[in-house]
Image (cartoon, grey):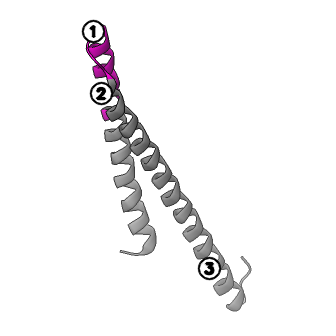
Amino acid sequence: MDRLDKERHDLAKAEQDLVAGEERVTRQALLVEELRRDGHDTSDAEDILATLSRTLEEFRRHRELILAEIDRYRGERRQKQGAEATSDGRSS
């Protein structure tokens, strides 16, 4: 597995994590609303929601880092191919 394949694999995992994280945040937000509607204390549920939301934001940042790495690697690969074409007497 080359670097690009590894990054693509990591991207797929990051996207799965994002979907799961979004589902957790949605479920927790609904739980907070249900607790509030039923007159219960929501402070612990809100703390959990805040933690889940921060974690989701980290998942988003991680996904962006992977995308940036994929772009960087593709750029390096294009440069290398262009250099090889130039050294072979071909134009890029």
Q: Quadrant of the C terminus?
A: bottom right
Q: Give the SS element for disc 3.
A: helix
Q: Position of residue 82 (x, y in %)?
A: 67, 79
- Which residue lies under the disc numbered 2? 45
Please state which of the two labelled residues, at mark 3 or mark 2, is closer to the viewer.
2
Q: Is disc 2 placed on a helix, strand or loop?
A: helix
Q: Amino acid at mark 1?
A: Gly
Q: Quadrant of the N terminus?
A: bottom left
Q: In this picture, which residue range is highlighted in magenta?
A: 24-42
Verify CB contact (< 8 Å) between mark 3 and mark 1.
no
Instruction: Answer left or right for 56 relative to 73.
Output: left
Residue 56's tag is: none
The x and y percentages for residue 70 are 52, 63
Residue drawn at x 62%, y 81% is 80
Say which residue label 3 marks: 81
The image shows residue 50 at horizontal and vertical percentages of: 40, 34
Q: Given the image, on which type of amino acid does mark 2 rest?
A: Ala
Visible residue check, residue 47: yes
Residue denoted by label 1: 39
Q: Vertically, is 31 above or below 36?
A: below
